[in-house]
Amino acid sequence: MNHAFIDSCVFISYGTEFEDFHSSCITFFDETDCYKCTSESVKRELSLKLKKRNKLYQDYSKYLSKKRNEEYKVSPDIHLNENDLRHLKEIIEQLSVIPAHEQLTFLRLFNKRLEIRINRAIRNLDEVIPRNEDSYFKALINTIIPNEDDSWILNDAIYWSLTTENATFVTLDGEIYYNRDKLLKMVVDYKMLTEPPIEILHGKNF
């Protein structure tokens, strides 16, 4: 792996101690010697993710500061996807073993550490490439990977790989990883290549 394009989920797992594959992401960012890059699409998604989670932590902090006679319910203006809900469950589990008077401090420091670690990882990249605006090719990716954000990120990574030797897309996303053969076949056919221009590697294989 000489050149690695890093998916947004790898940054999130790097910054979160209890995320799956956190230790693997530490190994990748801090110990793996390769050219590391990402794209403006990834940075945009990370920014939105951090803003949403900061809002979620503030919402849960309000709940913690009350008497908590009722079960926590997320504020209706915070729209959580499946990953966000899983993350919330894990946060609540972490807080459950911490004394009540320390929970607010833990949550505030946790949020700060997450932002610091992700921003440090971004600063240490070798390159952040521009977003690729080929909406037609992105739509082709979208037929295999239905998530809009993931499709744009893959669009960036694949175009980057066309001019990069030994290119690897590094992800923790099972939907991308387990559809990699189908996805790369589409790339080869559409671009009229003899072999895929990029390898897709899951974080569990670091």
Image (cartoon, rainbow, N blue to C red):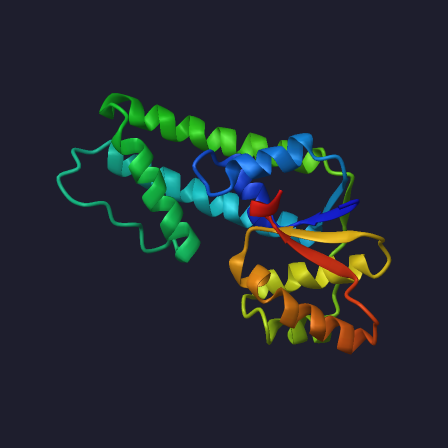
Which one is in front, 123 or 51? 123
Whole-percent x and y of residue 16? 48, 36
Vertical order, 195 against 156 (above or below): below
Vertical order, 8 against 58 (above or below): below
Residue at image position (41%, 29%) is 108
Residue at image position (53%, 42%) is 12
Can I make out residue 46 in this image?
no
Can I make out residue 201 in this image?
yes
The mark total stands at 0
Whole-percent x and y of residue 85? 36, 52
For the C terminus, which image quadrant? top right
The residue lying furthest to the front in this view is 205
**With 122 as the anchor, is 26 left or right in this view?**
left
Vertical order, 145 against 115 (above or below): below
Vertical order, 159 against 61 (above or below): below
Residue 138 lies in quadrant: bottom right
Which one is in front, 131 or 164? 164
Which one is in front, 73 or 83? 83
Residue at image position (33%, 34%) is 94
Whole-percent x and y of residue 189? 76, 77
The residue lying furthest to the left in this view is 69
**With 68 as the anchor, is 102 left or right in this view?**
right
**With 49 as the anchor, is 198 left or right in this view?**
right
Residue at image position (23%, 25%) is 100
Whole-percent x and y of residue 168? 73, 52
